[in-house]
Each structure stands twice: as structure tokens, then as C-alpha cells.
Amino acid sequence: MAKNKHLTLEERRTLADRLKEKESFKSIGNELGKDCTTIAKEVKNHITISQVGCTGKVYNNCKHRFHCDESRLCDDCTYPRMINRCRSCNKCNSICEKYAPDPCPKLDKPPYVCNGCSKKHNQCTLQKHLYIPKTAQKEYELSLHESRTGIGITEDEVKQLNALFSPLLRQKQSIHHICANHHDSVMVSESTIYRLVDYNLFDARNMDMPRKVRYAPRKKKKIFKVDKTCRIGRTYEDYRIYREKHPDLPVTQMDSVEGKKGGESTAYHSLCKSRMYACISPRRK
């Protein structure tokens, strides 16, 4: 069984399909190679709440919805047919004083969602809990990003470091010098101290470090990665094969030249020139 492996989008789609087929967490875990508790936590942590009705009925999760006699709750009702039947209006739950929520008892036990419920689209007007793979994947990626950003120390530790570093930095001592002389009191690395100063969490600022302001931040080179699958069927050999099969089609050669965007006229020294061959086929009528 694979451990310490996060679920992928494809595995989440499989999970949603099995929930629709009313499979148990145990069987889904065996298929995906995960523990059943992992599957249960995945479903419970990524539930999407949907307040929609069913076919021919609006959303209404009030416990009195079957025998309610309330009418004309709205002074300016926009639904003339529903004047005498407020329980059939989508504003009933928000304006009625007798409203009492009626949670579905099936959501308190596995699978905790309505994906496999047969009444979801035909009869149920209650609040629905759904497991949607794309939404779960986005929530997972967001939590993964948030867990890896910010500072991993407490506020008290920041105050302790501030009391140590700020007075010495204002005395023109370097961070490396302070860390070397107080290595027993510093529980983080030098790069973390630099980030704390950049985030303005210390009383001292970057201006208090003379060498810091002399160096400009490094420019990160943007790497453009091309998906190799876009070249399938578009190579020069494919072009030659296509020409052999269609020798009567005319050929047009086009040269495209593009300079540095936003640069001066001297950017022509770094021009990128590419050739493209295109076969012009007759238009379909």
C-alpha cells in the first residue's frame, strides 16, 4: 500500500465515480492503494455545500415544508403563482419566522456526501453535500501553497529575535556577525533573519544594514517550458510525408521576426528567427 503519497486529480475523479456507485471507503481505498481512513478524511475535508432543489422544486430545507400553510410573506411577491404557497418560493427559508432547518440524517454517517444518493435530483430539496474532484484538487493545492509560505515561527520567537538583532543591527553589525556571536540564542538560519527584516517584523530595517542596500535583488530568469506533446504530428518529417500524400497542394514559406518586447532598436541583435512551412488546402464548401 502506497504511503505518504498525496491523491492526484485522476485518483480524485476515481473516488467520485466510486462514491456515485455507492462503494465503501474500504473498497475505494483498496482500489487506489490508500487506507480507508485516508479516503474518509479526503471526502470530509473537501465537501462542497450546494443549496439547490430538485426537478420541479426549489431549495427548501425547512422541517415544516410538507405541511406549511404560510402565505403572502412578501409584500411585493414576484412569483404570482406562489402567493398562497410560500413554501414553494426560494425566499421562504430566509424570511419566514417559523423556519427550522432539517438536516439530512444520512450525512452524519459514511459516505458523508450525496454523490450516490438516488433522491438527489428527483425528490430531495435539502442542503446537499457533494464531493467534486476539481474543487477538491484546487483546495488541496491552495492548502499546500499556504503551508509552504510565510514564517514557521511563533510571535514570541519573533519578539525574542527582534530584541536581540534590532539593537545590534542599528549599531551597524552584520547578521552573520550577530549569528556567529550569539549562536546559542538564535534558533533560525541567517536567511530567515534576512526575510524577517524584509517583512518588517523587526524594529530594524534594511536601511540599517549598509551592505544590504548596495545589492539589488537577483532577477529570476523565467523559464518557458514547451509541452513536447504539441510537436506530435508537426515535425518536418511529418511535413514531408504530408507533401508526398498531397503533391498538388501549393506551399507557402513565411519568415517571422520578433524583437525584444519593450526594448530599443538595438534589440535586433538578439532577434529570434523562425521558419514555418504551411500547406494551403482548398476551403471546404
Image: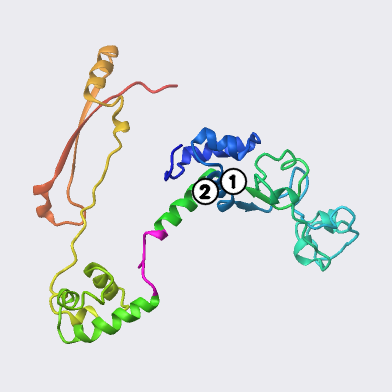
**Considering the image in quadrants, where does the C terminus appear?**
top left
Q: Is residue 203 visible?
A: no
Packing grade of label 2 (10 A; few <14, some 14-19, many >=20) is many
Viewer-proximal residue, 168 or 83?
168
Answer with left or right where residue 115 lies relative to residue 245. right
- The type of residue carrying mark 1 is Tyr
Q: Position of residue 18 (x, y in %)?
A: 60, 35
| Residue 39 figure quarter | top right
Looking at the image, residue 257 lies above or below residue 278: below
Q: Which residue is mark 2?
A: 136
Give the answer, above or below, for where 171 lies relative to 225.
below
Residue type pointed to by label 2:
Ala
Query: Which numbered disc covers residue 208?
Result: none
Task: Judge the density around disc 1: few (<14), some (14-19), many (≥20) Cα neighbours within 10 Å.
Answer: many
Residue 164 is at least partly visible in this image: yes
Q: Secondary structure under badge 1?
A: loop
The residue lying at 19 percent from left, 75 percent from top is: 179
Determine if the magenta segment contains residue 149: yes
Rendering coords of residue 208 (x, y %): 19, 82
Quarter residue 204 falls in = bottom left
First to last magenta residue range = 146-154
- Are circles 1 and 2 on residues that touch, CB within 8 Å? yes
On screen, residue 142 above or below 36: below
Indicate yes or no whether the magenta region holds residue 18. Answer: no
x, y percent for residue 275:
18, 33
Q: Which residue is mark 1?
A: 131
- Using the numbered discs, state the Cα–Cα distance from disc 1 to disc 2 in whole angstroms: 7 Å
Q: Is residue 11 left or right of residue 98?
A: left
For image coordinates 53% across by 49% down, the residue present is 135
Q: Nearer the viewer, residue 75 or 118?
A: 118
